[in-house]
Each structure stands twice: as C-alpha cells, then as structure tokens.
Image: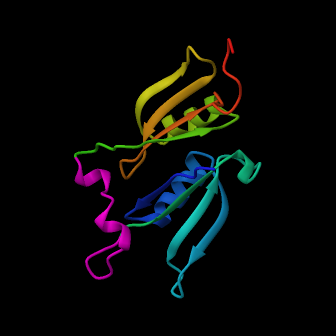
C-alpha cells in the first residue's frame, strides 16, 4: 500500500479545505498538547480507508523546524511547481468539481472524460499543491486487457 503525504503551512486550513471543499473525510486527526494539528489522515470518501488515504501535516518553522524540512519544499518556494501530485479516486467527480469551481480554486485541467475511462479534473489548492480527482480506478483491470 502506498499512502501519499504532504505538508501545509496552515494545516488547520488545509484540513477544512480538503474536507469541506474537496469532500475528503477525516479518518484520524492527531493534535499536540496545545491542540495544534500535527498529523491527519483523510479518506477519499465516507467509505473509509478502503477508498484510499492521504496524510497531511505541518511544515516546520524557524522556531521549531520539522525533520522533513531538509527533504521537502513548499510549492510557494518553487514558483508553484511540484514534483509529485496527488490523484484521488472519488465517486462523485462532477459534484466535487462544482464545489471546487464554486470555491474559486485555480482549475488547472477542467472536468473532462479521459481516453482510458472515467472523468477527472485537476486543481491547485490554496497553498499550491496539485490535486487530481477522478473516477478512473487504476487498480481495476484496464480496458482492453
């Protein structure tokens, strides 16, 4: 199993964005003694972890650097470019696209049918991370196989 993870400067806002706007569901949220989010696990749908997980956490800061700071960089520090994006298989692609558009997110690739099957769209989230949501499930046999 591979579970993608990414970091946010404002993980609280990211948690709200991912759940309310993109429709992810909280699987587990861990907080420190002051209530600050230190790690969250989200599922692609209400079906639970079998629908796929993504993990988010905070970036470090000058006062409290994070051990990943030496290995990862925020999209804002790269001119908005990323080396990895996240693809989530979701059951209600068109509805989530409508929510993303209503939230005035930057749409990188509009809702479209893919030649290999399914619908998908790609957005940039408020902190610059790139997300594709689609109905094509690469774990299922491909057409023509």
Q: Going 47% across and 61% down the picture, which residue do you hit?
A: 13
Q: Position of residue 135 (x, y in %)?
A: 65, 29
Quarter of the rendering containing residue 106: top left
Its colouring scheme is rainbow
Provide the major secondary structure of the magenta segment: loop
Magenta-highlighted residues: 60-78
Q: Does the stretch in magenta take in 68? A: yes
Quarter of the rendering containing residue 88: top right
Q: Going 57% across and 65% down the picture, which residue do you hit?
A: 40
Q: Does the stretch in magenta take in 71? A: yes
Using the image, determine if residue 105 lies above or below residue 137: below
Q: Quadrant of the C terminus?
A: top right
Q: Is residue 82 left or right of residue 21?
A: left
Q: Nearer the viewer, residue 3 or 98?
A: 3
What is the count of numbered marks? 0
Q: Position of residue 82 (x, y in %)?
A: 33, 44
Q: Nearer the viewer, residue 121 or 116?
A: 116
Using the image, determine if residue 106 lies above or below residue 18: above
Farthest residue to the bottom: give it.
33
Farthest residue to the right: give it.
47
Q: Is residue 62 left or right of residue 97?
A: left
Q: Is residue 35 left or right of residue 137?
A: left
Q: Going 42% across and 60% down the picture, which residue do you hit?
A: 7
Using the image, determine if residue 70 lies above or below residue 114: below
Q: Going 37% across and 53% down the picture, which residue do you hit?
A: 127
Using the image, determine if residue 11 lies above or below residue 75: below
Q: Position of residue 3 (x, y in %)?
A: 57, 52
């Amino acid at each position: 199993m591979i579970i993608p993870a990414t970091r946010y400067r404002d993980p609280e806002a990211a948690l709200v964005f991912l759940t309310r706007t993109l429709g992810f569901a909280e699987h587990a949220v861990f907080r420190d003694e002051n209530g600050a989010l230190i790690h969250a696990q989200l599922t692609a749908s209400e079906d639970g972890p079998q629908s796929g997980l993504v993990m988010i956490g905070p970036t470090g800061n000058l006062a409290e650097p994070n051990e990943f700071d030496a290995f990862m960089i925020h999209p804002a520090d790269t001119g908005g470019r990323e080396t990895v994006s996240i693809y989530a298989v979701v059951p209600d692609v068109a509805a989530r696209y409508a929510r993303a558009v209503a939230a005035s997110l930057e749409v990188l690739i509009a809702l479209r049918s893919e030649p290999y099957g399914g619908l998908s769209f790609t957005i940039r989230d408020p902190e610059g991370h790139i997300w594709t949501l689609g109905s094509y499930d690469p774990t299922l046999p491909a057409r023509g196989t």
